[in-house]
Image (tube, rainbow, N blue to C red):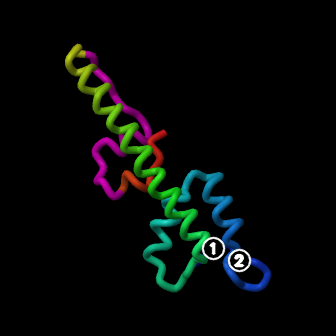
Amino acid sequence: PALARASNGAYDWPYLLAAAERQGITALLRQWLAGEDAIVAPDWARATLDAAYWGQHFGNRLLLDELRSLLAHAAAADLPVMPLKGAALLHGAGRARRRERPVI
């Protein structure tokens, strides 16, 4: 895998986690690493990845619940509404994907 490595050949976990955070893909990195048996993250890095993953999941649940409410109110008022970007993608997505993708 083409992950950043330190000069000693080990994975540069502080850099990887900081880069993933900057790009908003920490939860995706956690999910990808779960399928990579050859890459073993240190406990502290796994804890950081797990926290991001579940934080994304529960944050998205709150936002999607709000979206459902807004869509129901709009439908009741006969107002056409079209969710865009992350919300549109997640509204119909399977539950597993909701943990990985940011809604906003």
Q: Are marks 1 and 2 in contact (CB under 8 Å)?
A: yes
What is the three-letter code of the residue carrying label 1?
Answer: Leu
Image coordinates of residue 47 in percent, x first then y, are: 55, 67
* Left or right: where 58 falls relative to 1: left
* Left or right: where 21 falls relative to 36: right
Q: Label 1: few (<14), some or many (≥20) within 10 Å? A: few
Magenta span:
79-96
What is the three-letter code of the residue carrying label 2?
Answer: Arg
The residue wearing badge 2 is 5
Image coordinates of residue 14 in percent, x first then y, are: 70, 67
Taking the spot 35% from the left edge, 32% from the top edge, the residue there is 66
Mark seen at residue 3: 1
Mark seen at residue 101: none
Taking the spot 44% from the left edge, 39% from the top edge, the residue there is 85
Where, quadrant-wise, is the N terminus in this rendering? bottom right
Q: Is residue 19 above or below residue 70?
A: below
Taking the spot 71% from the left edge, 77% from the top edge, the residue there is 5
